[in-house]
Amino acid sequence: MKRDGWTSASIGATAIVFVVSAVVGFILLPLAQPHLGLTGLWDAICSAAGVVSRPSPAVEAPQKGTTVVMTPNMLASADAQSIGRGATLAHQCAICHGPAGISRADSPTLSGQFAPAIYKQLKDFKTGARVNAVMSPFVVNLSEQDMVDISVYYAYLPRLPSPWRTQDRPAPKIVASGAPLRGIAPCGSCHGDLDHKVGSPWLGGQSAGYFRGQLRNFASADRHNDINEQMRTIARRMTPEEIDEAALYYSGEAGPIQPLPR
């Protein structure tokens, strides 16, 4: 009988220790840590047991970037058949980009645009790297050859002259010489006039509204299909005044232009 008493006492003591340990470890200690953000008893028990009782905060998917690989001779050997097919396909583009590729609204002018630049944007719209309420649905049914044909057709059309060469007033400093101390190269070093990098669009004749809007979209990362984030970096470093000056200059519209220093 004496042995049975010790056995009962040992079992009872073990049970008490277990219950006290469970209460302390699974309830009191978790609730004593406010940084865990627990909302009640069940949350405390789940947290101590290593079980997530609430869904984790949603993690935003990374922005989809361009998949287009640009090469120096890209679309350089377009034939007449491809241009002709592009002319037919371009009829459905005319409502926004003009019958001859010269827009009268805030859509980009495409006449004389570099073929790789047009192709890249069409491809980016198709893959979702660039999103637009009008263009994204439009490109869904375009084949690879369709995008090539449209690109070479618009490149075949005559290009609007650069305001840099036709206006009597000088180009603004941000266009002609950039801002070296802020790591901004002259616009013309990538977009023509001074030099051209494949995939970069010709800017002359683009509407001020479109031009300004795209720079702001790059600065805010709402547009993110630039290669290696080049335009996002540049746009973030430009002042609002510089964006306006470049937009007015390339559009050929009148506006306050700061002369180059003599």
Image (tube, grey):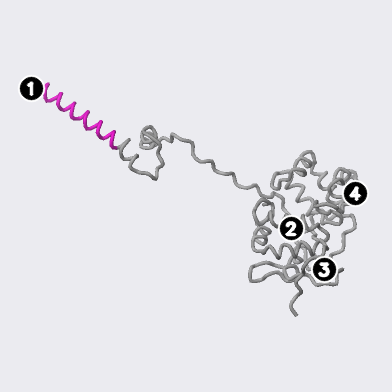
Q: Which label's residue is closer to the chain start, 3 or 4?
A: 4
Q: Is residue 158 magenta?
A: no
Q: Which mark is residue 199?
A: none
- The amino acid on which the numbered mark 1 sits, given as a three-letter code, is Lys
Q: Is residue 156 rendered to the left or right of residue 107?
A: right
Identify the secondary structure beneath mark 4: loop
Quadrant in which the N terminus appears? top left
For marks 2 and 4, give the one nearer the viewer. Answer: 2
Instruction: Look at mark 2 in the image and give the residue it sits on.
Output: 212
Instruction: Look at mark 1 in the image and give the residue it sits on.
Output: 2
Tell me what residue is drawn at x 65 percent, y 47 percent.
64
- The amino acid on which the numbered mark 2 sits, given as a three-letter code, is Arg
Q: Is residue 236 rendered to the left or right of residue 139?
A: left
Residue extending farthest to the bottom is 262
Q: How far, Cα to Cα, is label 1 from label 4?
A: 107 Å
For marks 1 and 2, give the one nearer the viewer. Answer: 2
Q: Which mark is residue 99?
A: 4
Q: How far, Cα to Cα, is label 3 from label 1?
A: 108 Å
Which region is colored magenta?
Answer: 3-24
Instruction: Look at mark 3 in the image and give the residue it sits on.
Output: 164
**Secondary structure predominantly adopted by residues drawn in magenta:** helix
Identify the secondary structure beneath mark 3: helix
Q: How far, Cα to Cα, is label 2 from label 4?
A: 24 Å
Q: Quadrant of residue 45?
A: top left
For marks 1 and 4, give the one nearer the viewer. Answer: 4
- Residue 51, how many percent across, how many down? 41, 35
Tell me what residue is drawn at x 54 percent, y 41 percent.
58
Q: How far, Cα to Cα, is label 3 from label 4?
A: 25 Å
Q: Which label's residue is closer to the chain start, 1 or 4?
A: 1
Q: Which label's residue is closer to the chain start, 2 or 3?
A: 3
- The amino acid on which the numbered mark 3 sits, given as a three-letter code, is Trp
